[in-house]
Image (cartoon, rainbow, N blue to C red):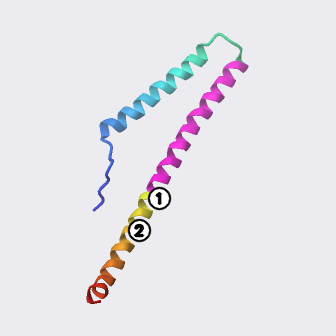
Amino acid sequence: MNIYENSNSAAFYNMSWISFAISMGGMIAGILYLESEIAIKGFLFMGYLFTVTSCFTLSKVIRDKHESERFITKMEKAKTEKFMADNVENIVKK
C-alpha cells in the first residue's frame, strides 16, 4: 500500500495543465500578433520556449532532490530502528 503525503487532487492537476495551456497559447498569440520583424518574433519565441523548458527541468530537479532526501531519511530511520532492536537487549542486560 502506497501512501503519498502531498497528493494533489485531480482538479488541481487539471487546473495546472489548463492554466499552462492558456498562458502558453496567449504568449504565442501575443508574439505572432506583435507588429515587428520576423527575426524579433523568432527571438522572443525562442526565449520564451527556453524559459518554459528550463522551468520544467528545474521543477523536476527539485522534485528528484526532495524524493531522494526522503528516501535517505527513510533508510537511516530503518537502520536506526534495526540497530536499536538488535542491541537493546544487550544494553538492558548490562
Instruction: Name the residue located 49 percent from the left edge and 53 percent from the top edge.
Output: 64
Residue type, label 1? Ser
What residue lies at 41% left-to-right and 63% top-to-bottom? 73
In the picture of the structure, the residue carrying the numbered disc 1 is 68
* Direction top: furthest residue: 35
Q: Secondary structure at mark 1?
A: helix
Looking at the image, tell me whether mark 1 or mark 2 is earlier in sequence order: 1
In this view, the residue in front, 70 or 25, is 70
Quadrant of the rendering where the C terminus is positioned: bottom left
Front residue of 82/88: it is 88
Kindly report the secondary structure that dominates the magenta region of the rendered protein. Answer: helix
In the image, 12 versus 38, the foreground residue is 12
Query: Does dot 2 land on a helix, a strand or a loop?
Result: helix
- Answer left or right for 69 relative to 27: left
Q: CA distance from mark 1 to mark 2?
A: 10 Å
- Residue 41 image point, x, y percent: 67, 20
Between 56 and 35, the residue placed more toward the observer is 56
Magenta residue span: 39-68
Indicate the position of residue 34 as horizontal and vertical percent values.
62, 13
Image coordinates for residue 33, horizontal then vertical, percent: 59, 13
- Badge 1 crowding class, 10 Å Cα cut-off, few under 14, some 14 to 19, many 20 or more, is few
Within-10-Å neighbours for mark 2: few <14, some 14–19, many 20+: few
The residue that appears at 27% across and 62% down in the rendered structure is: 1
Which residue type does callout 2 highlight? Met
Which numbered marker is on residue 17?
A: none
| In the image, residue 83 lies in the stretch drawn in magenta | no
Q: Which residue position is annotated with label 2?
A: 75
Say if the magenta span includes residue 57.
Answer: yes
